[in-house]
Image: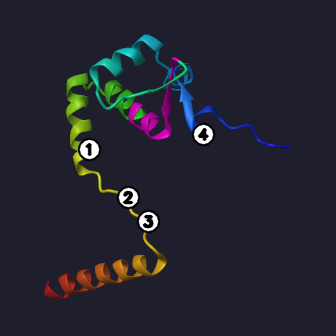
Amino acid sequence: MKKAKKSYESLYISFQEVAKILKVKPHVLYYWEKKLPQIKPYIISQRRFYKKEQLDVLFLIKKLLDEGYTLSGIRKILVKKKKLQIPKKDFSKEETQKIINEVINELKEIYNRL
């Protein structure tokens, strides 16, 4: 028997489902969309949907709001976070091992200097 997917495990998550998952009212989500440019839903057949990556950002926003941050403060944090992100690259096993060895060698050199 197939196991049912949770809504947040599918490719696109509906606006209503996101509101339920975050435990916020839909109008709050609309407000966040207006105030935070990082939240861009996909519009499919005049319905709003989010991807998993956007859900992660929404969880972060909710967490920061619960901690007492303002939306303008959160906007600044999200801008900084975006600047600090390293582009994802898939490395082969050999490339990964080479990078790990280089880091180990550099750490050994630093340790020997101490």
Query: Furthest residue to the left?
Result: 113
Query: How many residues crowd mark 2 within 10 Å: few (<14), some (14–19), many (20+)?
Result: few
Residue shown at 43%/65% (left/top)? Answer: 90
Q: Which residue is mark 2?
A: 88
Q: Earlier in the sequence, mark 2 or mark 4?
A: 4
- Height in image: 31 above or below 84? above
Q: Earlier in the sequence, mark 1 or mark 3?
A: 1
Residue 85 visible to an observer of this rendering: yes
Q: Measure the alpha-carbon separation of dots 1 and 4.
A: 24 Å
Amino acid type, callout 1: Lys
SS label for mark 4: helix
SS label for mark 3: loop
User: Which quadrant would residue 88 be assigned to in this image?
Assistant: bottom left
Q: Measure the alpha-carbon separation of dots 2 and 3.
A: 7 Å
Q: Nearer the viewer, residue 104 or 13?
A: 13
Task: Magenta stretch: give its range.
Answer: 46-58
| Magenta-colored stretch includes residue 30 | no
Q: Which residue is mark 3?
A: 90
Residue 70 visible to an observer of this rendering: no
Q: Relative to residue 65, is residue 5 drawn left or right?
A: right
Callout 2–callout 3 Cβ contact below 8 Å:
yes
Amino acid type, callout 3: Asp
- Height in image: 11 above or below 43? below
Which is in the foreground here, disc 4 or disc 3?
3
Q: Return the x and y of residue 50 as percentages of the image width and height.
A: 48, 31
Residue shown at 29%/51% (left/top)? Answer: 85
Query: Furthest residue to the top?
Result: 27
Q: Which residue is mark 4?
A: 9
